[in-house]
Image (spheres, grey):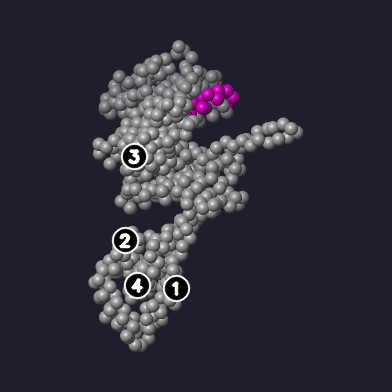
């Protein structure tokens, strides 16, 4: 099951948009859009979902008009249409939803000095409430001496003190999920257990002798009780020091059954409190391990009223990257606790923009680990990462193109060109490599002397472009279309054109013939610019800034196409103006 479309109506900056995305489960889905397009509105729609409706904060209504009723609609590939508005929420019937976003908010405090009031502003990081309501503190009612007495005369010989087991949340979580305790109340179970434990208490000798007798004479009867055997096997799987053999496992299982029966309804409450203690310890250790400012701030979950809360330093006291990785990890832990359904949606709204390389790896590691954990549980998680970053950026880290699914919230007004792509794919062919690198991928003053007709024919490339002079005429027509018209343009052509033009402009500024040759022989546009600077040529800052375009890697494997991410950059108004400035002849 995939999420085929997401439709948003009247939420913050979005009046109405239908996104055809095909969101896939258990893979990072990266949704790319430029700043100002409405990524935060997308996230707010999901973050405003309540169990029975969508409930917007007043400032999040479209055009600040509460008469604009919000609607969020999901269409699944199964054909179901799920709707959340101000009267219903069928999305919650299928999905748990959690949103991770920026946790800072401005705060203003009014102070008085000399009879005058001044507002002091600061940027605060919102406290993270990991657990809204801490369970009531109820402990397991286990006492080893009491249990041995209840067992009978041989209790001291064969029962071990297993109080340590009642501190293991994972054990009781598995027991709760996998064991049907009602089976132990059935007549067959009661008869076998009562009679066998009576026989054990009739035995004489040391504990070792009695346990050997139990293994031979009693364990086969225990093994015939499926649920009892299952409980013993769960206990064995944890390899507790107190449980050294099969006999220990069955007798420990008997102790747990007795504790449950004696506690009645309080047993479940004791389980809940134990799970809480385990979660608190996990939260504490994980946050501590990622705390980059532990020398200055002891950041850990603390009990506040009846909630478990993480309070953060002031935003100005730690870097944006430190803030983002810490709050992300805390909120991811919270989402894992909140996800109960088989299908879950996790929205991550641009929290990773300030992360350094190490923290970005940590971010992607935790998302990948979360996905793997859900898959092991045969559940589906739909991680949706909202970003303005080039999705190729992520391929340098944990995510790779076999894992990620990239979609564009805003489709750029672009088209691909298969003939340009073929030149890129074939650029390293021995017969043309040196020539295309010199005359197609960079500026060369003798461009009008080159004819690669035979070579292009042999490689099935566009023979009309076998002369680079003709190729660049097409490139410059495309740049004119990009700068002056509103029709689709070819982003790769713009990349070629910007490289060519900047290198030509700088080449023309160099007067010394030897330096002109050295400039041409220098590899890479940026290196060429640095060489020109080293010989005293003034290079406008714009030429370096446009590296965002001309440094786009044009070393692609067959089938790769970077037109979309490149097109998104080229649609930016500032980028377009910078390119217009280096082509003053285009009006």
Q: Secondary structure at mark 1?
A: loop
Q: Along the line of sight, which residue is nearer the eye, 349 or 519?
A: 349
Q: Kindly tell me whether residue 416 is visible in this rendering.
A: yes
Return the residue at label 3.
91
The span picked out in magenta is: 535-549
What is the tally of numbered marks visible in this picture? 4
576 vs 1: above or below: above
Label 1 and label 2: CA atoms lie apart by: 25 Å
**In the rendered image, the vertical position of residue 424 relative to residue 291, given as above or below:** above
Cα distance, mark 3 to mark 4?
44 Å
Q: Residue furthest bottom?
A: 204
CA separation, marks 2 and 4? 16 Å
Q: Which residue is mark 2?
A: 178
Measure how far apart labels 3 and 1 are at the Cα level: 47 Å
Name the residue rendered at 30%, 19% in the picture.
Answer: 464
First along the sequence among labels 3 and 1: 3
Quadrant where the C terminus lies? top left
Q: Is 541 contained in the magenta span?
A: yes
Give residue 109's position: percent from left, percent from top. Answer: 63, 37
Question: To which quarter of the image does residue 467 belong?
Answer: top left
User: Residue 254 shows which numbered tag?
Assistant: 4
Residue 143: which disc? 1
Q: Is residue 4 visible?
A: no
Count residues near mark 3 (Cα–Cα under 10 Å), then give few for <14, some for 14-19, many for 20+. Answer: many
CB within 8 Å, label 1 to label 2: no
Magenta stretch encompasses residue 498? no
């Amino acid at each position: 099951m995939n999420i085929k479309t997401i439709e948003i109506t009247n939420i913050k900056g979005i009046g109405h948009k239908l996104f055809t995305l095909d969101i896939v489960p258990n893979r990072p889905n990266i949704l790319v859009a430029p700043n100002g397009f409405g990524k935060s509105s997308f996230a707010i729609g999901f973050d405003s979902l309540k169990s029975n409706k969508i409930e917007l904060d007043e400032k999040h209504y479209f055009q600040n008009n509460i008469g604009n009723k919000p609607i969020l609609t999901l269409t699944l590939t199964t054909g179901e249409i799920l709707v959340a508005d101000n009267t219903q929420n069928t999305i919650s019937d299928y999905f748990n939803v959690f949103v991770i976003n920026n946790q800072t908010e401005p705060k203003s405090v009014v102070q008085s000095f000399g009879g005058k009031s001044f507002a002091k502003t600061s940027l605060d990081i919102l406290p993270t409430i990991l657990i809204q309501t801490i369970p009531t503190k109820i402990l397991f009612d286990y006492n080893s001496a009491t249990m041995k007495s209840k067992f009978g005369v041989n209790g001291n010989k064969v029962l071990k003190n297993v109080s340590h087991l009642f501190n293991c949340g994972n054990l009781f979580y598995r027991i709760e999920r996998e064991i049907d305790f009602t089976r132990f109340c059935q007549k067959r179970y009661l008869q076998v257990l009562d009679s066998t434990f009576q026989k054990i208490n009739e035995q004489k000798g040391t504990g070792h002798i009695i346990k050997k007798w139990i293994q031979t004479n009693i364990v086969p009867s225990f093994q015939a009780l499926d649920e009892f055997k299952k409980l013993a096997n769960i206990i064995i799987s944890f390899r507790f020091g107190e449980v050294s053999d099969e006999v220990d496992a069955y007798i420990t299982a008997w102790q747990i059954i007795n504790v449950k029966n004696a506690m009645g309804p309080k047993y479940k409450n004791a389980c809940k409190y134990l799970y809480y203690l385990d979660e608190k310890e996990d939260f504490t250790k994980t946050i501590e391990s990622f705390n980059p400012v532990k020398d200055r701030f002891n950041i850990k979950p603390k009990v506040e009223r009846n909630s478990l809360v993480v309070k953060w330093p002031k935003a100005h006291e730690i870097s944006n990257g430190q803030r983002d990785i810490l709050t992300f990890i805390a909120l991811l832990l919270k989402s894992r606790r909140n996800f109960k359904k088989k299908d879950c949606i996790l929205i991550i709204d641009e929290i990773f923009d300030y992360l350094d390389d190490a923290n970005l790896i940590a971010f992607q590691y935790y998302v990948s680990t979360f996905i793997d954990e859900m898959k092991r549980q045969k559940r589906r998680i739909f991680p949706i990462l909202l970003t303005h970053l080039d999705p190729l950026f992520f391929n340098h880290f944990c995510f790779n193109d076999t894992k990620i699914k990239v979609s564009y919230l805003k489709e750029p007004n672009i088209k691909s060109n298969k003939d340009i792509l073929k030149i890129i794919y074939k650029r390293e062919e021995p017969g043309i490599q040196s020539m295309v690198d010199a005359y197609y991928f960079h500026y060369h003053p003798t461009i009008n002397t080159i004819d690669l007709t035979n070579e292009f024919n042999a490689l099935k490339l566009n023979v009309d472009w076998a002369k680079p002079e003709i190729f660049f005429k097409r490139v410059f027509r495309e740049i004119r279309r990009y700068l002056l018209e509103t029709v689709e343009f070819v982003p790769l052509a713009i990349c070629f054109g910007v490289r060519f033009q900047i290198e030509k402009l700088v080449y023309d500024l160099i007067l010394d013939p030897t330096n002109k040759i050295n400039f041409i022989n220098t590899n890479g546009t940026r290196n060429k610019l640095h060489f020109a600077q080293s010989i005293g040529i003034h290079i406008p800052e714009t030429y370096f800034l446009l590296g965002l375009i001309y440094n786009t890697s044009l070393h692609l494997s067959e089938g790769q196409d970077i037109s979309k991410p490149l097109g998104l950059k080229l649609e930016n108004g500032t980028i377009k103006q910078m390119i217009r400035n280096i082509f003053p002849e285009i009006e």
